């Protein structure tokens, strides 16, 4: 569903598969469950909490395990997300 110019306050918003353009989020809980990627364009996000549930939460847990197992591997994953070069081994 596409949301344009909507205002959300003190709400729990599941982002999966949604499209937000020029929306305002104030004091919301923004949740991603690992489904279809949301589109967020030109939105204002103030004092919101980000959460990951279901598949997204399991992915975050796996990344934490990788980081604990091999810090360089974890740093390289984070660098890849940022679009930065990998750290030397």
Image (cartoon, rainbow, N blue to C red):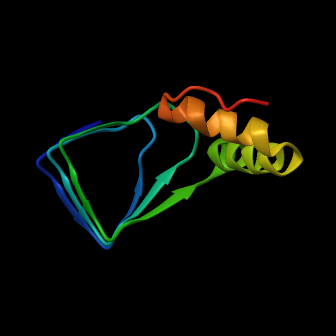
Residue furthest out toward the left: 5
Identify whether 46 is placed above or below 30: below
Of residue 83 and residue 43, the one placed in the foreground of this image is 83
Residue 72: quadrant of the picture: top right
Identify whether 80 is placed above or below 52: above
**Is residue 12 left or right of 54 when viewed as pictured?**
left
Residue 5's x, y, as percent? 11, 48
Q: Residue at x 85, y 42 (%)?
A: 70
Residue 18's x, y, as percent? 35, 38
Residue furthest out toward the right: 69
Q: How many marks?
A: 0
Residue 65's x, y, as percent? 83, 48
Q: Residue at x 45, y 32 (%)?
A: 37
Residue 81: quadrant of the picture: top right
Q: Quadrant of the C terminus?
A: top right
**Is residue 65 left or right of 60 when viewed as pictured?**
right
Residue 21's x, y, as percent? 18, 40
Q: Quadrant of the N terminus?
A: top left
Identify whether 36 is placed above or below 14: above
Identify whether 38 is placed above or below 65: above
């Amino acid at each position: 569903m596409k949301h344009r110019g909507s205002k959300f306050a003190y709400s729990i918003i599941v982002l999966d598969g949604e499209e937000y353009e020029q929306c305002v989020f104030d004091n919301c809980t923004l949740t991603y469950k690992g489904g279809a990627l949301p589109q967020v364009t030109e939105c204002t996000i103030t004092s919101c909490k980000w959460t990951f549930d279901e598949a997204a939460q399991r992915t975050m847990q796996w990344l934490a395990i990788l980081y604990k197992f091999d810090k360089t591997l974890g740093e390289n994953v984070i660098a890849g997300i940022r679009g930065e070069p990998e750290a030397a081994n």
